[in-house]
Image (cartoon, rainbow, N blue to C red):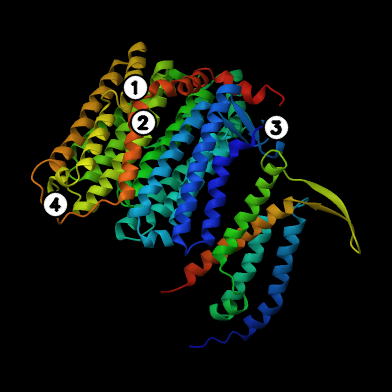
Amino acid sequence: MNNLIVLPLIIPIITAVLLVFLRESIMLQRIISLLTMIAVSSITLILLNIVQAEGIIRLDFSGWLPPFGILFVADSFALLLVFTASIVTTICLIYAFSTIGNRHEKMFFYPFVLFLIAGVNGSFLTGDIFNLFVCFEVMLLASYVLVALGGEIGQLRESLKYVLINVVASWMFLVALAYLYGTLKTLNMAHIAERVAEVGQDPLLTTVAILLLLVFSLKAGLLLFFWLPGSYSVPPAAIQALFAALLTKVGIYALIRTFTLMFPLDQGITHTIIGIMAGATIIAGCMGALSGRDVYTIATYNVIIGVGFILIGLAVGTESALTGAVYYLMHDMVAKALLFLLIGMMIYLTGETVVKNMSGLIRNYPLFGWIYFIMMLALAGIPPLSGFVGKILIGQGAIEERAYVLLAIGFASSIIVLYSLLRVFLASFFGETTISFEDRKPIPKGAYVSFCLLAISIIYIGVGAETLSVYVKDAVHTLVNPSIYIDAILKEGA
Amino acid sequence: MKINDVILRTVVKGVVFIILTLGVYLFFSGHNAPGGGFIGGLVLGSGIVLLYITYDLETIQSKMPFDFKKVAALGVLLATGSAIGSLYFNAPFLTQTDGYFNIPILGEKHLSTVTIFEAGVALTVIGTLVTIILSISEDE
């Protein structure tokens, strides 16, 4: 038992509720929300080191032992993602301080961001699949509000679609849970894994697994991503960055958990389907990114390509591929957040969304331009930046498993990513500037701070991959040996 | 046109007390029997909504000057507060405790911290329910 595990969920919730009472004092809201996220990040770092020393730790809520009660489980994989998510949220908050505007801040923007991160952290940490559903809902409800906040026509149109799609997906999630409970009589993830291993994964269980695959694919934007480009284009930049960094990643996390821990036995069917879906996602994402004329389309389809690429790691499923997937997940959270923040700033500076109509930004804002350049190289996977480690390891895994088609699609997508972003770079940053140095709008200092922090994180994940490898290795060790996870929860009497 | 609603007003004056009493009863019976914070809160909330429907917004707001958004927030705070209270005693998150106390006049009673949690749930439900109904009914 270690009560620290619940803090990444409960601290944001309590702070968010307190902020409701401080609606008028915006400065106080900013300070408190920033301090909260810094506190959550540091607690997660402490937890991560505890897990390295003591192995997986769990917290049984109100002392009900598994499999009967609800519990939180902290293993390295979940904690790495909680840590990255908290850091990214902190940085997005810094960006939001100077850009989001008074109107959002007065309409409970900070409380909803904190609810969002509470849902995200809860989804990563929970060890009970029904609780995963609840945490998903906390996250989604906050995201519904954040999509629609501002009340512009485009936002209302897209939020309606977004809400409908997610309500249907959540309903399917409940149906899948009902089947699961009907067949296995348990909702504890470790207990499900144990029972699936005992009875063998018969076709009925595989069907349930595929239903879960469908649900999480909708949430992660794996093949079923038709809702994503629209709803990710409408909210303000700070919210877009949070969505691109966090929401799809929670779906990916759920997929990886489901198919490494709970249903890993019938890989011939499930992992083949995931592989096909990942390949198709990448191809469709590439076509979208190539066809895009405005920066939003290019950026949102890049999110989709990233999702497909990470899930190649899951589809291949070897140790090195999963290691790559974990690295790439962390990289993608940071890099996608930076991409959306930069694009938001480009649109703020020029008032344009179409790539062709922007020009020569780098003359007025050199640092801004070079940070975009670094982000682009990282997303394309150029060493020594953050995307490289993940790409090379997923590639290595694909070669081990002779998944040459996926390998080819994955690496071809890197070129497309580079091309689509380079096009923006050449058109918008290079060339003659349309705005003279004197007339330029200044970039707010807070925005620069957030760009630099994210750029440093990108460089750190790439150059400092060795320092992270202790944690990543432990995370993947648990993923490929689910018995470690199961034993930590069901064996010991603690 | 002014609608003649004398009957509605007269009936509601009596009925609303029955509804509110039922809500409180459900809230307290919840520990060992059907009921609890959620259901009790729903019944209490619907009683308040009935008042809003029968009389107008201004009358009720002058008698009950609460911001129901803040009522909901207070409820969440109470519920989460009772949940993290266990952290202070180094017990697992959400642990509740109970005991039998001798209270003068009432005799020996069973008191539990779950009631605080349930009160939080009830306030959240009341706050959310009334906020939803009020936002729908408000016309700009």
Q: Earlier in the sequence, mark 2 or mark 3?
A: 3
Label number found at residue A331:
2
Question: For residue A286, what is the image quadrant?
Answer: top left
What kind of residue is marked 2? His
What kind of residue is marked 4? Phe
Q: Dot 3 corresponds to which residue?
A: A65
| Same-chain check, marks 4 and 2 | yes
Q: Dot 4 corresponds to which residue?
A: A437
Tell me: residue B59, above or below residue A454: below
Q: Earlier in the sequence, mark 2 or mark 1?
A: 2
What kind of residue is marked 3? Leu
Pair 2/3: label in front = 2
| Circle 4: element type | loop
Front residue of A248/A202: it is A248
Q: Residue A394 vs residue B45: left or right?
A: left
Separation of disc 2 and disc 1 at Cα? 9 Å
| Same-chain check, marks 3 and 4 | yes
- Where residue A226 appears, as percent x and y from the top left, is 32, 42
Residue drawn where x is 53% and y is 65% of the image = B131
Q: Earlier in the sequence, mark 1 or mark 3?
A: 3
| Circle 3: element type | loop
Answer whether labels 2 and 1 touch (C-beta < 8 Å): yes
Q: Earlier in the sequence, mark 4 or mark 1?
A: 1
Pair 3/4: label in front = 4
Separation of disc 2 and disc 3 at Cα? 36 Å
- Where residue B18 appears, as percent x and y from the top left, is 73, 71
Pair 1/3: label in front = 1
Q: Earlier in the sequence, mark 4 or mark 2?
A: 2
